[in-house]
Image (cartoon, coloured by chain):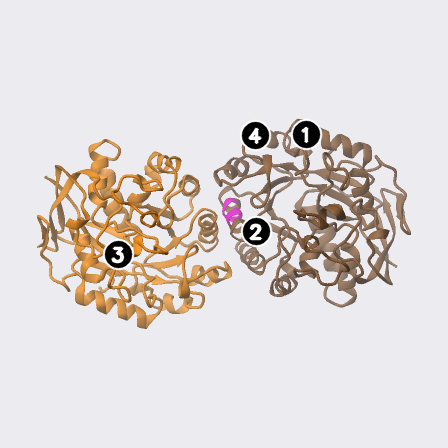
Chain colours: A brown, B orange
């Protein structure tokens, strides 16, 4: 048995408020604990989006009632809420800016809308960006101009990781995360059973084998592993207009432990990128008496049917992995053991409440 | 009569080598002198492109034989010529990088291709960028990372000029130019006679009235006026697949003098942006005993039929303007007077030859 710290996932779509048929604070945090994740940071593009005091209260009330692991809630940057989100920054995990691919109140097409957010965001969390390719580099310009720490979400391309490498070498305050699906999958999905094209839909898109190779070759540039856990139901994924997104909380650790067993990753790198680095980058509190026990020798196939997420599928269905979460202790209490979540709804704490 | 210095146009497509049915070093420099421009910097996206020693020699030999005004020749950044262009930087006006909208040997789609150019370009000219919107901001990230002066070509959008304003305020080494067609025209062209959609085609595209207003409201951020003189024949513009680009050398000064007469621009601003600033930004030599004499009271209509450019049309056909170039003296010699170019082919000098 290997003992790990409780992992931190800085990129989770809980789907509550607004889309609890896909997931909610109860099932998302059950999935987290089953995956060895004891702290999640929840994205703000819910319905309604979390982008002012009243919507922040809405999300945090749902979380307080239902969450089984610890959590923080992002605020979302909109075209006209820079003052408002700055005012509530201490209660938020971080500020999320969608520079590509989003809808509604969080659209920031015009770069002049970025200026006020970069000018005013006070932390403690960084500015986290959905920013692909050129937009990512544009964000690095703003980071430098305003001396603002930025965290690039779900890096997927060779050019992105290489430009971030150069930026770090030159002192830009940039960190980044990579998702397991961008480390292990190319489009179209070929390994899962009964796959429709909709199941390959994710943003950023699955990239090429060259991109995947570049991510693995530049592991030292990757600060965090993050799931971008984005559950949609199977009927949505297999229907018309399939929404982009994959669940990921319950496959993160088995996939990474398998990479460790294959010698592609060290256990120290795993702990650095799934615990120490997110704690430092997001200024997160310690979780005392918190441990994850893993059987690193257990070989099995990933099955959505055995998972806690409400969405009912995984892009890694049937993948053979090595390494199973056996037990999770959070703040001294056993919260997961041998397939069962033992923490009650409401056990989770807001990491920004102190 | 108003006396002006010889104007400098840092953005001219001469079309030689390769497309001399549109323009060549003779007709382009005749058009320049007729427009009060005594020095042009020639873009490298000719056929072949100017992107190594032998193609640079090719362009400079044609210029030496035919040019009637002074000139510099750009080198173009390609995917694999960073060392080569750096080696010949002292003979080049500047380095041109096409981050958007180009073809063939000068395509730089992947941002990793930008790294070597930003690392190695030694000047004396800046790195000049065709970089719109997000690509422009991405270029500002590279400028900051590599502490490289960049000059943004043909700014056309509100968001671009406002981001450049902020970047300048924060010490980024960025300068920029604006073209008359982006100051005076919106799409589709409505003022010219017998216009087909092809005649509106230009890159960057003609923008909205809001964008135009933002450029005028931020005149202090605009370092240079540049024509992006990009002649195509009328049959090309009115045919299938009309190529993007407008001629501009012979309409620059009449349009700007008209703006002066209307109180939208001062003569000092005009001279600053069409002479002093390009001289400083591109480290260009003085042209001794060089003067442009303008009749600021002469009102008339712009007519392509009276122009020297080979292309035979102008998007400003029939526009009523106030201010006419009467005489141009270059290095002590009268090179243009009352509609006639008096300089011989070969009179022009290479500004980097010294």
Please tell me if label 2 and label 4 are on a single chain.
yes
Q: Nearer the viewer, residue A113 or B228?
A: B228
User: Residue A231: in sight, yes or no?
Assistant: no
How busy is the neighbourhood of tag 2: few (under 14 within 10 Å), some, or many (20 plus)? many
Task: Give the x, y percent position of residue B86.
Answer: 37, 65
Please tell me if label 1 and label 2 are on a single chain.
yes
Which mark is drawn over residue B233?
3
Q: Over which residues does the magenta segment extend?
A: A138-142
Closer to the eye: label 3 or 1: 3
| Quadrant of res B1 | top left
What whole-number distance in Å separates the C-alpha atoms at marks 1 and 4?
15 Å
What whole-number distance in Å separates the C-alpha atoms at marks 2 and 3?
39 Å
Q: Quadrant of the N terminus of chain A?
A: bottom right
**Residue placed under numbered mark 1 in the picture:** A55
| Quadrant of res A157 | bottom right
**Residue placed under numbered mark 2 in the picture:** A132
């Amino acid at each position: 048995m290997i003992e790990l710290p409780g992992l931190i996932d800085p990129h989770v779509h809980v789907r509550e408020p607004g889309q609890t048929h896909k997931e909610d604070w109860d099932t998302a945090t059950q999935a987290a604990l089953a995956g060895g994740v004891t702290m999640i940071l929840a994205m703000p593009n819910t319905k309604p989006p979390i982008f002012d005091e009243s919507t922040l209260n809405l999300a945090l009330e749902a979380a307080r009632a239902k969450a089984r692991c610890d959590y923080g809630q992002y605020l979302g940057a909109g075209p006209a809420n820079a003052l408002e989100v700055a005012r509530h920054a201490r209660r938020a995990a971080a500020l999320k800016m969608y520079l590509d691919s989003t809808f509604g109140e969080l659209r920031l097409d015009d770069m002049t809308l970025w200026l006020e957010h970069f000018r005013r965001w006070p932390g403690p969390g960084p500015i986290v960006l959905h920013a692909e390719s050129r937009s990512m580099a544009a964000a690095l310009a703003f980071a430098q101009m305003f001396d603002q720490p930025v965290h690039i979400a779900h890096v997927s391309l060779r050019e992105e990781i290489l430009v971030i490498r150069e930026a770090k070498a030159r002192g830009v305050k940039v960190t980044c995360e990579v998702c397991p699906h961008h480390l292990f999958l190319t489009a179209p999905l070929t390994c899962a059973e009964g796959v429709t094209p909709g199941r390959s839909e994710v943003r950023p898109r699955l990239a090429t084998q060259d991109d995947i190779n570049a991510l693995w070759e530049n592991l030292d540039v990757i600060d965090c592993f993050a799931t971008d856990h984005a559950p949609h139901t199977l009927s949505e994924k297999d229907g018309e207009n399939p929404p982009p997104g994959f669940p990921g909380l319950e496959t993160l650790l088995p996939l990474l432990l398998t990479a460790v067993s294959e010698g592609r990753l060290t256990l120290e790198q795993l702990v650095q990128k799934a615990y120490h680095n997110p704690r430092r980058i997001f200024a997160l509190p310690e979780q005392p008496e918190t441990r994850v026990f893993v059987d690193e020798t257990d070989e099995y196939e990933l099955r959505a049917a055995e998972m806690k997420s409400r969405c009912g599928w995984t892009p890694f269905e049937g993948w053979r992995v090595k390494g199973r979460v056996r037990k999770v202790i959070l703040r001294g209490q056993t919260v997961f053991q041998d397939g069962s979540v033992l923490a009650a709804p409401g056990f989770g704490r807001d990491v920004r409440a102190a």
